[in-house]
Image (cartoon, rainbow, N blue to C red):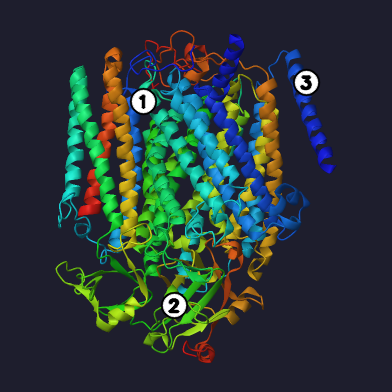
């Protein structure tokens, strides 16, 4: 009858094709985490191969079927796993999963808007992402297997199925999936930017925005400007693969014959790819940095130190990220002068990064820190950002890069800054805003256990890689056992693999906590962390429009924690002053005493 | 609450309407979308520039390739492309007039000017299709693609595989190679293959007519590849722009915007149309003129 | 069968875990507390753990250095490698204390400033002086590193001038092997192109080119004379490869369709290096360092560095292209 029909349609539009930003953020979160978990399993599988090369594992045979005859991974399947691991983690978990979740959840709530500017485009953004996930997963099952030329898919390897099986149907699906992914990302970014500019509530000037919003804004702008170039690169590759053009191919002799492609250059692909590729890593990192700023400040009960400097350094990082891409290409044979230019710009980008770290430290100084799992992951982000960032000084210096390029030194560096820093930011965000996502609280003890296992094992996995790199061990090698000079490295590899397996188990604690708490966790109060920002003024229950009645107006910046008057007492009696509290007669805004 | 509420940028979503330039969110979105689209085109044009620079010695000159004018015989270098460009620019002008009429809420004028914009767009797309047809079809004479071998270009030995030689005249006795006798001097004659050298070379290679993605009678295959790709990508944008314009045109006639109280939608598609025009100016400059 | 048992066990563990969590929540409720509230004791405990972690982290770092620092590459066997090793060392002297200090401050602050209900946090929101200080300091340090780095880079990437005595070797990479071609008496490499590949001429050398006739093609291992600058020209026949000579601190991509170049001067013979590394079986090696297909992990060629006389003898034994 009509009510029954109404129910079905309601379900469809409330849960599946929702245009409500809070539901969409949960969709991104769950999809992102599922893909991430898959990526994690893939890495554990190839770590088994690297730790115990050539050994047979029944469990692998069970999981991977014909990919693993006799339980031993084959070299081209190894490369397929490595490629898919990189693709899934960088794009599906850390770009869509991280930005999609938190930009969607927090932008309207923190700026005081009822929803994103266009709920419809937002909904499309998620479903395009979903389709792209499906296509990427489908590529695992086609003939020839998934794309196998590394997540960077350089041609000619990625253009020629005769060079590696994964460059057949698997690569085609990869390209189609990523094109749709780029559309999803663009739709999302357009929404985020326009919402932040146009839909702020009364009194919410740009300099009263929480740093999370600044981070999401800059990330979205980076995405709008850089993803199209990857689209261009991918489309040209599609043509080279399927229509016989020679954009990237020239003078190739393979499979006993000379191919009919002349004039192209693989270096063009590298330029186009890294023009996105470098801003991409900041697209991954900036939201995590924004989340950390927010959490460290709230949980230390102190204003973030250097609010304007933080904004300035994020803008500097965003701007500089466009002019450093060549540091991935020092050894391609490009003009050495260009190499010098890129060295210069790359080492410049270290400066705003350092400024941010010092600002975080000063925020903690003389704070009154409440250690929830969110706080701890934020602290972990600062630690890994330092540890991973300093090795960038070696990699960014072209002369020094000569001997460590494409070795495990690079693998260690980028995993610590992305695989640790950025994912820690994501975990921190989930623990901190879980009450806003699900109206319930996650369990702190399990969260603490999750944090300690993760940080210990993660450093255990990636720190030793620097030593491998300095011994000259190249990356993307199926095994190191073909070179006598690498024989002694096996201990390091075993150590890393064991840590990786334990880390995987640690993540199960998180997933258990997440799922349990989403359904049966204790109900959350409206403002569990006693935060100042607007999202905590919205009622716990979800409804379209976020606030009953009028949207609250804002009178101050979001970092009035532990503000005291001349007598040393808390102004208004508490160690936090929400943005919705009007300024007192003698009070100045924005961090002035 | 309905799940498909249309959010009008001017109503109560924002508690305070402080937006950059006072622009509604729809217009702002269009601007950012155009920025991203501009970067796609930039990627392609950068790629084009990369090769144009690398193969500058043997790159075909556009004015020798695009020489046809509909219904007129003879050699009119780039004349038709110039006309196409003029028509597209005029359609942008009519678009501006439509937007201006919309700001005055003058429905009749909006209809007139949008109509001419759509016509301009259709003529452009049709012309581009015509250009493609002639490009693909090639000339009567055709060209000859050399096979494996070498040629001494003023002391440097060059590989001849894939090199396109053009016939000097109908007799097919002299094959003009893409290298000039004095490198870089546009007035210096092209190097030639005649007589026995020509016969030897012809044993190894194939005659080509027209151009497609793998072979190009006009010169380097990448020239054709980029021609199809970039003008195709642009043409798709023009076509989608025409479709969008048409939809808005119908809406104007139906009075949708009179009811809404403003013609902002005309302005938004106008932005897209100007973008498409501006990209064409760049494509025309970098591909045809440089 | 095994799968079913495992699945059941997993489900039971999950159910048990859920019940335990519920019990913990109810227990806290009965005590009048909220399970998600972090008590002062709990905060202090985590703060202590932070400090313990830092100490363990540094211990871990120290342990790694003790265990694995010795595994690093031996002393540079090329002239420019000495410079880059020195600069790497300098960079380490800068980043290691930075790493230890900043991490230390971070975890120490976590310990020292963990939550206390009797203390108020200090409202300290900005300081232009501090910002200026820690913007300028890194900038200065980086300037030093950049200047040293760029001067090394320019020196390394300059091809050997013709006047300088040197040998020229073309290294061709292909799936999954390397081929070396020496320039021969005339010191010039003959032309080559993929279209000329046929039978024995596996790298496509142009037989009609005078310069090619005395070139010597070598597989499996190639030799270098000590102290003589060697100019490499790199090619690839199929996909991207990268010629990586870790002991010589040298690397350059091999790109199909173009040639790339790199040069170095070997300074330690294979014999000497065997003594230095205490390994009779040591050999210099060339590896592929850019993902190139299934057997990317096994694309190698040995390199022998020896005295000029030994090298000349070896070279004389190699066949020229004509032969």
Q: Name the residue under label 1.
A: A197
Name the chain letter of the residue that bears numbered label 3: C
Foreground: disc 3 or disc 1? 1
Q: Distance between the residues labelled 1 and 2?
A: 61 Å
Q: In this view, does C17 lie to the left or right of A422?
A: right
The numbered mark at residue C196 is 2
- Residue at 58% in and 34% down: A31
Q: Distance between the residues labelled 3 and 1?
A: 47 Å
Same chain under badges 1 and 2? The reply is no
Task: Give a yes or no on whether discs 3 and 1 share a subunit.
Answer: no
Q: Can residue A56 be seen in this view?
A: yes
Image quarter where the N terminus of chain C lies is top right
- Crowd around label 1: few <14 · some 14–19 · many ≥20 (10 Å): many
Q: Residue C257: percent from the left, percent from the top?
A: 41, 67
**Cα gap from disc 3 to disc 2, whole angstroms:** 78 Å
First along the sequence among labels 3 and 2 = 3
Q: Check disc 3 and report the residue beneath it.
A: C23
Residue A238 at x, y percent in the picture: 45, 51
Q: Which of marks 1 and 2 is in front?
A: 2
Asked if residue A188 is positioned above or below residue C222 in the image, the reply reads above
């Amino acid at each position: 009858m009509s009510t029954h029909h109404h129910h079905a349609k309601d379900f469809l539009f409330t849960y599946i094709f929702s245009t409500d930003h809070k539901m969409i953020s949960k969709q991104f979160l769950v999809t992102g985490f599922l893909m991430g978990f898959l990526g994690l399993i893939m890495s554990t599988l190839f770590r088994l191969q690297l730790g115990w090369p050539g050994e047979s594992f029944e469990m692998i045979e069970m999981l991977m079927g014909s990919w693993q005859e006799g339980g031993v991974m084959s070299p081209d399947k190894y490369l397929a796993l490595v490629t898919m691991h990189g693709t899934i983690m960088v794009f599906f978990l850390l770009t869509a999963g991280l930005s999609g979740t938190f930009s969607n959840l927090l932008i309207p709530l923190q700026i005081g808007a009822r929803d994103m500017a266009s709920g419809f485009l937002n909904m499309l953004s998620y479903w395009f992402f979903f389709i792209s996930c499906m296509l990427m997963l489908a590529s695992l099952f086609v003939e020839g297997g998934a794309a196998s030329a590394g997540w960077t898919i350089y041609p000619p390897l990625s253009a020629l199925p005769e060079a590696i099986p994964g460059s057949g149907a698997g690569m085609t699906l990869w390209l189609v999936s990523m094109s749709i992914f780029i559309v999803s990302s663009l739709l999302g970014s357009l929404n985020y930017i326009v919402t932040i500019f146009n839909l702020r509530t009364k009194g919410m000037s740009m300099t009263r925005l929480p740093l999370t919003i600044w981070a999401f804004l800059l990330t979205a702008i980076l995405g709008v400007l850089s993803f199209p170039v990857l689209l261009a690169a991918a489309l040209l590759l599609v043509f080279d693969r399927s229509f016989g053009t020679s954009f990237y191919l020239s003078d190739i002799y393979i499979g006993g014959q000379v191919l009919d492609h002349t004039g192209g250059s693989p270096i063009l692909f590298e330029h186009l790819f890294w023009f996105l590729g470098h801003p991409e890593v900041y697209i991954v990192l900036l939201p995590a940095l924004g989340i950390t700023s927010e959490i460290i400040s709230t949980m230390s009960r102190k204003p973030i130190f250097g609010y304007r400097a933080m904004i300035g350094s994020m803008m500097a990082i965003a701007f500089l990220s466009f002019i450093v891409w060549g540091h991935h290409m020092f050894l391609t044979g490009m003009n050495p002068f260009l190499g010098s230019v890129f060295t210069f710009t790359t080492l410049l980008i270290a400066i705003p990064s350092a400024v941010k770290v010092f600002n975080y430290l000063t925020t903690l100084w003389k704070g009154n820190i409440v250690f929830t799992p969110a706080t701890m992951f934020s602290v972990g982000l600062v630690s890994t950002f330092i540890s991973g960032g300093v090795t960038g000084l070696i990699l960014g210096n072209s002369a020094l890069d000569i001997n460590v390029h494409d070795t495990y030194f690079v693998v260690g560096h980028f995993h610590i800054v992305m695989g640790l820093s950025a994912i820690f930011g994501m975990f921190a965000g989930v623990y901190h805003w879980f009450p806003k996502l699900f109206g319930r609280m996650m369990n702190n003890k399990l969260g603490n256990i999750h944090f300690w296992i993760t940080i210990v094992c993660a450093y255990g996995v990636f720190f030793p890689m620097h030593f491998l790199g300095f011994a000259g061990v190249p990356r993307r090698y199926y095994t190191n056992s073909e070179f006598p000079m690498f024989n002694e490295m096996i201990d390091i590899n075993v150590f890393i693999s064991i840590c990786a397996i334990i880390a995987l188990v640690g993540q199960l604690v998180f997933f258990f906590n997440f799922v349990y708490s989403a359904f049966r966790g204790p109900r959350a109060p409206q403002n569990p962390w006693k935060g100042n920002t607007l999202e905590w003024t919205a009622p716990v229950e979800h409804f379209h429009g976020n606030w009953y009645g009028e949207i609250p107006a804002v009178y101050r910046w979001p970092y009035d924690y532990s503000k005291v008057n001349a007598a040393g007492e808390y102004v208004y009696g508490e160690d936090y002053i929400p943005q919705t509290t009007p300024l007192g007669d003698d009070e100045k805004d924005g961090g002035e005493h | 609450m309905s799940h498909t509420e249309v959010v009008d940028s001017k109503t109560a979503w924002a508690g305070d309407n402080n937006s950059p330039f006072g622009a509604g969110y729809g217009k702002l979105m269009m601007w950012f979308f155009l920025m991203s689209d501009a970067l796609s085109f930039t990627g392609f044009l950068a790629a084009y520039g990369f090769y144009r620079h690398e193969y500058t010695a043997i790159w075909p000159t556009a004015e020798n390739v695009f020489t046809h004018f509909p219904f007129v015989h003879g050699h009119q270098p780039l004349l038709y492309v110039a006309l196409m460009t003029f028509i597209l620019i005029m359609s942008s002008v009519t678009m501006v007039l439509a937007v201006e009429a919309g700001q005055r809420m003058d429905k009749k004028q909006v209809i007139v000017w949008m109509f001419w914009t759509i016509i301009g767009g259709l003529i452009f797309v049709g012309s581009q299709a015509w250009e493609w047809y002639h490009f693909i079809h090639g000339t009567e004479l055709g060209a000859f693609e050399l096979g494996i071998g070498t040629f001494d270009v003023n002391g440097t030995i060059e590989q001849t595989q894939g090199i396109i030689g053009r016939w000097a005249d109908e007799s097919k006795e002299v094959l003009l190679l893409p290298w000039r006798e004095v490198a870089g001097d546009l007035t210096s004659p092209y190097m030639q293959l005649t007589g026995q050298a020509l016969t030897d070379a012809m044993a190894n290679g194939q005659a080509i007519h027209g151009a497609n993605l793998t072979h190009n009678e006009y010169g380097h295959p990448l020239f054709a590849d980029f021609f199809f790709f970039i003008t195709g990508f642009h043409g798709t944008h023009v076509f989608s722009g025409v479709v969008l314009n048409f939809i808005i045109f119908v809406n104007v006639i139906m009075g949708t915007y009179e009811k809404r109280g403003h013609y902002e939608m005309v302005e938004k598609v106008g932005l897209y149309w100007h973008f498409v025009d501006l990209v064409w100016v760049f494509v025309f400059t970098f591909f045809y003129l440089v | 069968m095994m799968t079913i048992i495992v699945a059941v066990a997993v489900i039971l563990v999950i159910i048990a875990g859920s019940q335990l969590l519920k019990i913990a929540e109810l227990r806290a409720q009965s005590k009048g507390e909220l399970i998600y509230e972090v008590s002062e004791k709990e905060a202090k405990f985590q703060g202590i753990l932070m400090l313990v972690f830092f100490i363990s982290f540094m211990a871990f770092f120290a342990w790694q250095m003790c265990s694995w620092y010795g595994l690093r590459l031996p002393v540079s066997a090329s002239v420019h490698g000495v410079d880059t090793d020195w600069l790497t060392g300098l960079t380490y002297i800068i980043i290691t204390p930075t790493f230890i200090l900043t991490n230390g401050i971070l975890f120490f602050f976590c310990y020292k400033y963990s939550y206390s209900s009797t203390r108020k946090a200090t409202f300290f929101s900005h300081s232009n002086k501090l910002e200026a200080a820690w913007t300028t300091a890194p900038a200065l340090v980086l300037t030093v590193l950049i200047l040293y780095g760029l001067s090394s880079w320019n020196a390394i990437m300059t091809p050997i001038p013709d006047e300088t005595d040197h040998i020229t070797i073309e290294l061709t990479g292909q799936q999954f092997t390397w081929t070396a071609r020496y320039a021969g008496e005339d010191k010039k490499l003959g032309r080559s192109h993929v279209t000329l590949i046929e039978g024995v001429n596996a790298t496509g050398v142009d037989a009609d080119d005078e310069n090619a006739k005395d070139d010597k093609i070598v597989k499996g291992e190639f030799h270098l004379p000590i102290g003589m600058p060697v100019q490499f020209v790199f090619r690839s026949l199929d996909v991207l490869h990268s010629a990586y000579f870790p002991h010589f601190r040298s690397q350059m991509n091999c790109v199909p369709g173009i040639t790339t170049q790199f040069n170095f001067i070997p300074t330690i013979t294979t014999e000497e290096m065997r003594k230095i590394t205490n390994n009779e079986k040591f050999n210099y090696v060339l590896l592929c360092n850019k993902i190139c297909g299934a057997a990317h992990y096994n694309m190698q060629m040995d390199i022998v560095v020896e005295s000029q006389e030994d090298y000349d003898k070896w070279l004389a034994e190699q066949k020229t292209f004509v032969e």
